[in-house]
Amino acid sequence: MTVSEAVREHAAEPADELEVGTGDGGAPARRAITRWAWRLFRREWRQQLLVLALLTLAVAATTIGVAIASNTLSPVDATMGTANHRVTIPGSDPNLSAHIAAIQKMFGPTEVVAHQPIAVAGSVATVDLRDQDPKGVYGHATVRLAAGRYPNGADEVAVAPPVAATFSLHIGNVWHQGGRDRRVVGLVENPQNLLDEFALVAPGQAIPPNEVSILLNTTDARFRAFHLGDVALSVEARSYAGQTAAATAVLALGTIGLLFVGLVAVAGFTVMAQRRLRAMGMLGAIGATDRHIRLVMLANGAVVGALAAIVGTVVGLLGWIAFIPHLEGLAGHRIDWFHLPWWAIAMAMLLAFLTAVAAAWWPARSAARIPIVAALSGRPPRPQPAHRFAAAGSALLLVGLSLLAFAHQKRPPLIVTGIVAITLGLLFLAPLGIAGLAVFARRAPIAVRLALRDLARYQARSGAAVAAVTLAIGIAATVAVSASAAEAEAVPTAGNLPTNQLLVYLAGPGPVGGGARCPNRRRRNSRSSRPASINSRPCSTPRTWPPWMRR
């Protein structure tokens, strides 16, 4: 057989078909796409600075908000220390020692604190003379030495700063109160209530006690099963429901803020996808699947979300630590730097991450559906029909408004769900509104015409921006209407005066003592002990009492 015959025979045989891979490349391809997305982010991070800043600000504000909300103590917590129950027995109980022993036998380790009130001359307030061990098992958290030392002897006392200011006391002075002379050996404070007016004496020196407090740790069910005869007990239990509710409310507000940021991020990622359209077209031309194209944008969103969550949390914690000294003066108690609801902070970080990924998903989905030739040409995709998502948007908007109506401003889950539904509804309805505005472009001035046609041409990013602006205006209007309704339904109160002060209204509006005097009123003796403002009530203005005094 000649060579030519062999070549013809081989050519006559059926050729083997070229096997083309049908997989998506697996993990190596996903790693390569992720690395490429990371390099794109490092090169174009300035173009995503607005989204990064908004997400970081939202996480930082939520972190500071939940920290402030969870570090407010109730009056009960301020004197309970680390205990969860406090039992108060009157000091006049004839079987006081026996009842204390019975409680200690039932609940194990307890701490007994005796109280004796000391009157303050010229005031209705009293000073609590407290017989307490500064190193007690539960009450040690309510006593802190600020200067000097703790009292040890029978004639020694340590006073709180408010008491020292009231009686002009300093370390080394002798305090003449309560029928005894006690030497001031130190300054103490209640870290959980800086306004607590008390004086600390050595254990066993508050005799006779006016009442005795017993601090203990137990469960509510076990305590309800305990009975102590016919003794009039006052029982207080610690509750963390208020702190948890406050942190949840702040987290709900942070979630609403993240929804607004998410709409802005959708517009930002849409612009990024348009700028990368040719690069993603090249990626598709060399064999990348739609999943790989989506992964480019999703990886970019994940990087933005993770970076914003970490930086926002760090900034929020630093801001919280810097604000603590100012907050201690406002709240009236010492604050532990790291006494924080870490679950709420973790939820804020997770929500920021999910917000960025979700905002990148829609542009990623749209970019993956663009044909390779159209992507390589760099032309914007043809806008989708505006009525396609109008029905779904209307339904979501109606559901969201209904949830807000049923929430009655008291149910955070319904409020957050309603806001989410309204946000999605606005996002779906925004293209329809943009299409409606584009109808008026023909007869509009040239500048307005170009703006309206640009909105209609880039419908995806314009719709997200319009939805964000609408959501912001809606939130502001809702807050204003809710505040006005709450103010209209509020019951008049006595204001914010302390419990040991009284406000007396002598006349109607205007300066006290102003107006014409009664001609037939007899002038009182100028040496009268009554204040002049009381003696000079005008006769032309009737006495008007505020609503809280009429009751």
Image (cartoon, grey):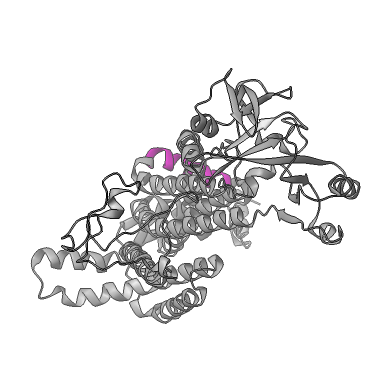
Q: Does residue 294 appear in the picture of this structure?
A: no
User: 289 or 517: which is nearer to us?
Assistant: 517
Rendering quarter of residue 437:
bottom left
Asked if residue 34 lies in the magenta stretch, the reply is: yes
Q: Quadrant of the C terminus?
A: bottom left
Residue 156 falls inside the magenta stretch: no
Q: Is residue 396 left or right of residue 447?
A: right
Q: Nearer the viewer, residue 418 or 463?
A: 418
Q: Residue furthest top?
A: 172
Type of secondary structure dominating the magenta stretch: helix
- Residue 212 occupies which quadrant of the picture? top right
Depth check: give the residue in front, 138 or 432: 138
Q: Point out residue 441 in the picture as x, y percentages from the top left corner.
A: 15, 73
Q: Residue at x 69, y 52 (%)?
A: 238
Count of numbered circles in the view: 0
487 above or below 144? below
Q: Residue at (43%, 42%) from the top-left corner?
A: 41
The location of residue 6, given as percent across then percent down, is: 63, 53
Is 415 situated above or below 64? Answer: below
Q: Position of residue 323 (x, y in %)?
A: 46, 37
Relative to 221, 38 lies left or right = left
Residue 197, position as x, y percentages in the image = 57, 38
Which region of the structure is painted magenta? 31-44
> In the image shown, does 383 or 349 lie closer to the viewer?
349
Q: Quadrant of residue 395?
A: bottom left
